[in-house]
Image (spheres, grey):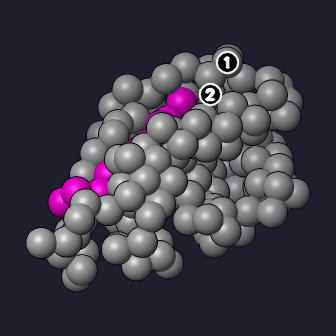
Amino acid sequence: MTPHKKQSAALALATAVTTLTLAGCSGKDPASQPSITRQQALTHVYQILQSTGPLITPRPRLEPNKLLSENGACPDEPDGMSDARVQVSRSYFLQGVPKQAHSSIAKQIQHIWKAKGYRIYGTSHLDTANPQVFADTTDGFLMALSTEGNGQLNIGATSPCVWPNGTPPPQH
């Protein structure tokens, strides 16, 4: 892969991650309302990703992508409360998948997520070895299938902004 293609692939992944991170905190609930807890968000993120992998053919081995898996503060929001809320992101490399299957896998994931009731809000390069699929759930979780700069498929999910213990701090 040429340096330009590597940069383009890295930029596409960075854009996907940024989209997940920024959009993940734009949930519908006001910041003063209770939310699910950080642990419940993590459980749901794992459920989304772990339930997708076994439905893909050829079945990939999910290897954690530590660079894109984190618990972190939410980006600043107009309500001024974002510094106390967090979001959870987890990401996996789809190992053991030949490049010639990438297009098929992307289309399978798109179908799987639609069948689960998730909204597909973007796709690109579905007929290539560098596909991307972006989706969200009705409760504000975001998912993405993307291709890393090294050509590996990566699947990730990000929670909406949540209060760590499910309730906002008392107002002063």
Residue 15, quarter of picture: bottom left
Which of the pair 65/165 is nearer the observer? 165
Q: Is residue 2 visible?
A: no
State yes or no: discs 2 and 1 in contact (Cβ < 8 Å): yes
Is 114 situated above or below 149?
A: below
Q: Which mark is residue 61?
A: 1
Q: Quadrant of residue 75?
A: bottom left
Above-or-below relation of 147 to 34: above
Instruction: Determine the residue positioned at 33% across, 31% down.
Output: 67
**Amino acid, disc 1:** Arg
Element assignment for label 1: strand
By secondary structure, the bulk of the magenta-drawn segment is best described as: strand
* Image position, residue 28 (x, y; %): 50, 78
Task: Of the two numbered discs 2 and 1 on the same chain, state the one appearing first in sequence.
Answer: 1
Q: Is residue 171 visible?
A: yes
When the figure is inspected, residue 125 is found, relative to residue 51, above or below; the finding is: below
Region of the chain picked out in magenta, as a range: 83-92
